Image (cartoon, coloured by chain):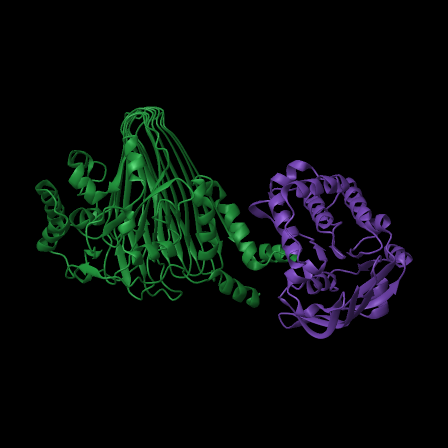
Amino acid sequence: MLSIQNIHAAVEGKEILKGINLDIQPGEVHAIMGPNGSGKSTLASVLAGREEYEVTEGSITFLGKDMLELSPEERSREGLFLAFQYPVEIPGVSTTNFIKTALNEKRKYHGLAPLDAVSFLKLMKEKMQLVEIDKALLTRSVNEGFSGGEKKKNEIFQMAMLEPKLTILDETDSGLDIDALRIVASGVNKLRNKNNAIIVITHYQRLLDYLQPDFVHVLYNGRIVKSGTKELALTLEDQGYDYIKEAFGATTI
Amino acid sequence: MKEEMEVLEQTIGSEYKYGFVTDIETETVPKGINESIVRLISKKKNEPEWMLNWRLKAFAHWLKMEEPKWPNVKYPPINFQDIIYYAAPKKKKALNGLDEVDPELLKTFEKLGISISEQKRLTGVAVDVVMDSVSVATSFKKQLAEVGIIFCSMSEAIQNHPELVQKYIGSVVPMTDNYFAALNSAVFTDGSFCYIPKGVRCPMELSTYFRINTENSGQFERTLIVAEEESYVSYLEGCTAPKRDENQLHAAVVELVAHRKAEIKYSTVQNWYPGDANGAGGIYNFVTKRGICLGEYAKISWSQVETGSAITWKYPSVILKGDYSVGEFYSVALTNHLQQADTGTKMIHLGKNTRSRIVSKGISAGKSQNSYRGLVRTGKNAINARNFSQCDSLLLGNQCGAHTFPYIEAAHPSAIIEHEATTSKIGEDQLFYCRQRGIDTEAAVALIVTGFAKEVMNQLPMEFAVEAQKLLAISLEGSVG
């Protein structure tokens, strides 16, 4: 589904990603872990197409298409979803209207007619239950005045509505208390199926306890330095990132 | 990021759709202003002597006045001798009906989306169309006359209803009010007149469409709406002009009179040519609009969507004279490129228990400057006057400016005056968030701007709300830089 080959990327001339390789198949959950500044969020931004991040080398293929040729909105409509670490507030635009616009843009891209009001409301109701989001939030402006937990729930709700093929959860666990974490994780689990894939970017094991990744990759200094199964995450939790730093040298950070 | 800016610029800076010129034979007077031009205009309109004398008095006063310098706008000095004060499409003969309007003119207004022909109108909106200095046609006159409503051009009103015109003209905006109002009083050429008799609820929206066509001409129209006791009218004006490299002056006066328990709702969709992206050309829109709630429980409500003009200078105001009268002002002012707007309102509370509400939404993009200027004054007899003001500004990009100048003068301790203001910016983060959800930059900006302006848009008559919303999106094209 996603094939990342030797991706190098820079921000303001500074190289952050130094040759990432990663293959993801439908149905898989990949966790990407690593210390601060290792390039985790840069990888998410590169995949989503943020223009401040310049890809200097390598290729990314997504569902058979050259992803680097696609604009951020095209990537989204093709089925890429990024759950933001810091969801953005958009005053004056109701969450419902925002999601409706997004959904209909995607439908238009795929040659489908816009969803009528009745079908849209029905879909919303169904997905609201799935991710346990409060109905009142959806009439409010996008993320405006939402608590940290509500913002993350809103991200997962949008994921549910847009039914992406590939989801990137960028530190979705950050700033969540244990109850919110459980609700968010259970929402994600309900959305998992054999046709979609998830990349989980996180510092900590606790989200992985819920999500049970198929693969765990350790990102360090712009490269994936170690890959393994979920046990690798446990080792990291045990020994901390220092052991990675020692093993792979902190020559250039 | 840079690419995003470019996309924004391309998508948001779309062309002004109404920039064409109609090739029509036009009768003009020589450039410049002096007493004989004032006399000539009056004569062309076959006006009674009192009207001419009023004009001459205004002109004499104007000569003694100075152009105001306090607005937060910059422009080179206007050469008032370089303006044509009267330009009229030549009539082949006297019109007996709408069918006889010059087809070229009909085509022009069709192109602008304004159908003068009554049969073709889908909605019940009566229109008076003004091209350059004169009213071209007014629709639905007969139907309105059946319920006693007078809706015609100002010129016709002066001929056919002189007693009404004489009674009310200058009663809300005196000829001496300000520099541009005085100029208008001397040289106004046409406009709309509307009279709603006692107890009548106007059965349709009334509307005037202003079009400037002739080069070097200025447009000086005057609109007067009188609503007798317990009557109601909703009125809308729209305006466009061709694209030209030089600036053109539009100095209008609008007066509203609401008697006891009458309600006037006045909406404006202002889309004068704003000039090009480099600031060449565009209309100077220097307008005086004021209404007075004469009687108890009268209500005047201004709604405006301002997207056009190189410079906008206008403060639709309400004098709340009658006890329990209500004044409202809802405004969306959008500036892009090098446009400048200094706009707002004045709410003058004189009567007891008067209330006013101000909602102003300023959107600045490009290198434009957008100022809100508002005055809330409560007089010494205005017991329990209340005002609520909300002024919000939205910035797109880093080179534009938003300014707020609220003035509050309360002369009675029982007044309650509230003012809230916010400033926000459409950020790269917001745009990227939208794009990640599949909403492209153009649609994202439209979504955000629409959300921002919603409260005001909801005040517009339904027929125009959709159009106004599209206009916002179009005017924003090429906006962020």
Q: Nearer the viewer, residue B127 or B470?
A: B127
- At a point 30% along the width and 59% down the height, the residue shown is B104
Q: Is residue A56 visible?
A: yes
Location of the N terminus of chain B (image quadrant): bottom right
Query: Percent from the top left, x then y, of residue B306?
Result: 39, 50
Chain A shade in the render: purple
Name, please, the residue furthest toward the bottom.
A57
- At a point 83% along the width and 49% down the height, the residue shown is A206
Q: Quadrant of residue B103?
A: bottom left
Q: Nearer the viewer, residue A239 or B275?
A: B275
Q: Nearer the viewer, residue B162 or B182?
A: B162
Query: Percent from the top left, x then y, of residue A6?
Result: 77, 73
Total label count?
0
Which chain corresponds to the colour green? B
Q: Quadrant of residue B161?
A: top left
Q: Does B377 appear above or below A95? A: above
Q: Quadrant of residue A122?
A: top right
